[in-house]
Amino acid sequence: MSMSGAVRAATTLALWSAAWRGGSSPDDVLTAIDGADQRAGVRAATDEIAVMTGLPGPGSPTAGSAALLPLLRAGGDAELLLPYPGDLRGLPTSGELTIAALDAGAAVTLTGSSLAVVPVNGHWRVFGNHARHPADGVAQAHDRLDDEVARATRSLTGMDVARQSDGARERVRQLMLAEAVATPPAMPRVASSLLATSISLQALLTVADSHDTNAVNLYQMAAVDDALRPLAIAIREARRAAVAAGVHALAGTRLRESR
């Protein structure tokens, strides 16, 4: 699974874990999770986690994705992590979890049970994780994203390296379709909107990062990278904020309806 596919899978798992706790049917939850291309099952990363969770351990055949449901129901709020070299917040400073999460570019911490779930080569691998990295609020993430989009636009325009083409637009469209997340029906509109924006901008960034620009030398290409790096971070944090807002609202659905 590509890194972008792993991010989509982890985003889906975090949102639908909250929907499951909020009253969604198990069939809907499993359809969404399996639809994120994680069909190879679930396995504990260590024998200790296998004993704790009842999941098959290292070297054993994976369990079906339904084995996630008890973990998600009891796991408390899900926290989406999008680690990259230089930012390991929410992960241990070293160890198998950190390596797997960095390779995938994503992980989901179940904060109530101190477990972390990582999409690895088409299956879910479950680790222990006591670290936390709360997301920004939606308004803060939105403002930061707006600021970085404006700054990157000014920088690229000033360098006269920005360029659009029919081919680039088509690649952006295809990436947006491929990375679209099937969100739960009760997802708040503000969270859905921010998530959609982050997916769209990530598609644009991916195409721009391929240097489909007028940059013709190493200096200009490095300047493009410098202009886009803060935007990439803002996009990650916007996705995390959107998911956090969604998790907060979705997990509370059952409680509100029972009053």
Image (cartoon, rainbow, N blue to C red):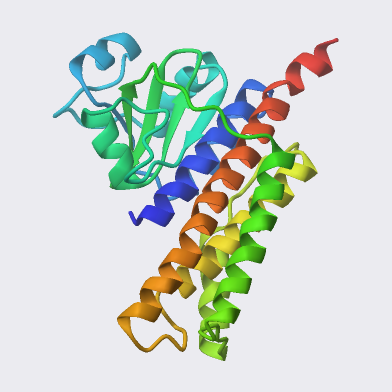
Q: Quadrant of the N terminus?
A: bottom left
Q: Which of 112 and 181 is in front in this view?
A: 112
Above or below: residue 23 compared with residue 230: above
The answer to whether residue 217 of the structure is visible from this angle is yes
Q: Nearer the viewer, residue 155 or 61?
A: 155
- In this rendering, position of residue 18 left or right of residue 2: right
| Rendered residue at 56%/53% (across/down) | 235
Residue 71 occupies quadrant: top left
Tell me where residue 29 appears, x and y as whole percent.
57, 35
The answer to whether residue 209 of the structure is visible from this angle is no
Residue 5 occupies quadrant: bottom left
Q: Which of 95 and 5 is in front in this view?
A: 95
Above or below: residue 3 compared with residue 190: below
Tell me where residue 204 appears, x and y as whole percent.
55, 69
| Rendered residue at 56%/89% (across/down) | 165
Tell me where residue 176 appears, x and y as whole percent.
57, 65
The single residue placed furthest to the left in the displayed view is 59
| Rendered residue at 58%/33% (across/down) | 135
Q: In which quarter of the image is the C terminus?
A: top right
| Rendered residue at 71%/42% (across/down) | 191
Above or below: residue 24 compared with residue 158: above
- In this rendering, position of residue 123 left or right of residue 225: left
Residue 27 occupies quadrant: top right
Above or below: residue 130 compared with residue 156: above
Number of marks drawn: 0
